[in-house]
Image (tube, grey):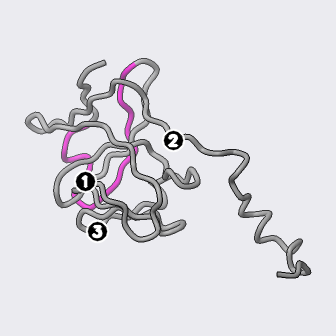
Amino acid sequence: MSWTKVCTIDEVPQGSIKRMWARVNAGVPLLIVHHSSGFTALPPICPHLEEPLEESGTIIGCKLTCTKHLWSWDLDTMELQDEAELPLKTYETKVDGDTLMVFVAEELEYNFDEEGDIDEDEFFSDEHEDDEW
């Protein structure tokens, strides 16, 4: 693959998150984050429990936080913060004039363990009220 235009830099104001598409193959969904050190492009879901980061992600400075379970990452250093246990996958970005370009060699995806995941709706239901702990 190669560099592809995703948007103009004005389309994603600093301190915001926006879902976009890289126009390669059938289209690759991206989350563009404009933080205090620039732009980061990543898959649009949290690596924890597939939470859409466009809805639950917040940006303060260079820190991206998924408000669903308080997983956070420093987008400048990519260090895990707070409750995060898994790193973010990212695409390389560059600004060409007023255009944000993203290098997409393949769609980045997280592997979710279907068998090991806890169904939160089931866990927090009334079924467990009588369970002895």
Which residue is painted at 37% across and 21% down in the image?
24
* Residue placed under numbered mark 2 in the picture: 110
The residue furthest right is 130
What percent of the width, then of the height, locates residue 16? 30, 58
Q: Amino acid at mark 2?
A: Tyr
Q: Amino acid at mark 1?
A: His
Which residue is painted at 80% across and 63% down in the image?
122
On residue 60, the disc is 3
> Which type of secondary structure does the marked residue at label 1 adopt?
strand
Q: CA gap, disc 3 to disc 2?
A: 24 Å
What percent of the width, then of the height, locates residue 78? 29, 54
Query: Which is nearer the N-term, disc 3 or disc 2?
Result: 3
> Which type of secondary structure does the marked residue at label 2 adopt?
loop
Is 20 in the magenta? yes
The residue furthest left is 97
Instruction: Read off the magenta span.
Output: 7-24
Q: Is 79 placed above or below 125 here?
A: above
Q: Is 19 placed above or below 86 here?
A: above
* Residue placed under numbered mark 1 in the picture: 34
Disc 3 + disc 2, Cβ < 8 Å: no
Label 3 neighbour load within 10 Å: few <14, some 14-19, many 20+: few
